[in-house]
Image (cartoon, rainbow, N blue to C red):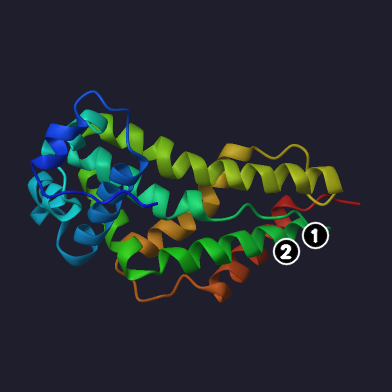
């Protein structure tokens, strides 16, 4: 049975000494996503998140050191970690295109896009948070690409001397430029196809 979250204040009194509540934690994450999707990031406060989740601020600070850390975890939980792993096929080029296309589709979601742009802006002002953003988002995506690249090498489709980090950064650079620059050019299925087609001559194994 789902835990009924009592009004603000009562929860704090009853929560002392209790183990971390999955329901409460999820309520806080959901509130963070909801508010950042509805307002500008700078206008969302810990107080507002606590009120929306119907918890006390102490519950939030017990688990997250800052608003940026909370919002980062909220958006990674609602996005990258919920994307099912790509099942490798017999064509690594098709896998690469499919992976980019589904990532682009997710990032076209207005709520996700707004939240991620806010986090990137915050990261430019806070080097420590910037490292967390890399580990939580960029590194996760690079690892997904590395798995595809290694699969392509195992199939004999990709060159074995490829620098995985350089290639992953080149591929994602194509996305982040369109996502952040303000260009009206889309990042859609066609763009994913074009990126892979452009890279193919340089990464394809020679007979």
Q: Residues within 10 Å of mark 2 (few under 14, many from 20)?
A: some
**Could you say where residue 175 lies in the image, as x and y percent from the top left?**
46, 59
Decide if residue 12 is on the left or right side of residue 182: left
Residue 185 location, quadrant? bottom left
* Residue lying furthest top: 17
**Up/down of 5 relative to 62, above or below:** below
Residue 197 location, quadrant? bottom right
Q: How far is disc 1 from disc 2 in space, using C-alphas?
A: 5 Å
**Could you say where residue 32 lies in the image, as x and y percent from the top left?**
23, 52
Decide if residue 55 is on the left or right side of residue 72: left
At a point 83% along the width and 43% down the height, the residue shown is: 154
Whether residue 120 is visible to the viewer of this picture, yes or no, is: no
Residue 100 location, quadrant? bottom right
Determine whether the residue tagged by mark 2 lies in a helix, strand or loop.
helix
**Could you say where residue 21 lies in the image, as x and y percent from the top left?**
32, 37
**Up/down of 62 relative to 22, above or below:** above
- Determine which residue is flagged by label 1: 91
Depth order, front residue of 139/109: 109
Depth order, front residue of 123/201: 123
| Badge number at residue 94 | 2
Whether residue 202 is visible to the viewer of this picture, yes or no, is: yes
Count of marks, rendered view = 2
* Residue lying furthest right: 207
Q: Residues within 10 Å of mark 1 (few under 14, many from 20)?
A: few
* Residue lying furthest front: 1
At a point 54% along the width and 71% down the height, the residue shown is: 191
Are the residues tagged 1 and 2 within 8 Å (C-beta)? Answer: yes
Determine whether the residue tagged by mark 1 lies in a helix, strand or loop.
loop
**Could you say where residue 81 lies in the image, as x and y percent from the top left?**
49, 48
């Amino acid at each position: 049975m789902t835990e009924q979250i009592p009004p603000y204040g009562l929860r704090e009194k009853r929560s002392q000494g209790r183990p971390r509540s999955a329901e409460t934690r999820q309520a806080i994450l959901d509130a963070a996503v909801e508010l950042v999707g509805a307002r500008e990031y700078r206008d969302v406060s810990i107080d507002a998140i606590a009120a929306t989740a119907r918890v006390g601020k102490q519950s939030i600070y017990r688990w997250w050191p800052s608003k940026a850390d909370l919002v980062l975890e909220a958006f990674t939980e609602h996005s990258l970690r919920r994307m099912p792993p790509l099942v490798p096929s017999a064509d690594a080029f098709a896998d690469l295109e499919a992976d980019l296309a589904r990532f682009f589709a997710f990032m076209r979601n207005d709520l996700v896009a707004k939240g991620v742009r806010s986090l990137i802006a915050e990261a430019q002002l806070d080097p420590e948070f910037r490292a967390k953003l890399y580990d939580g988002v960029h590194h996760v995506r690079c690892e997904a690409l590395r798995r595809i690249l290694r699969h392509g090498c195992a199939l004999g489709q990709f060159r074995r001397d490829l620098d995985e980090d350089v290639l992953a950064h080149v591929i994602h650079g194509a996305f982040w430029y369109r996502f952040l620059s303000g260009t009206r050019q889309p990042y859609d299925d066609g763009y994913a196809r074009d990126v892979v087609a452009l890279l193919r001559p340089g990464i394809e194994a020679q007979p």
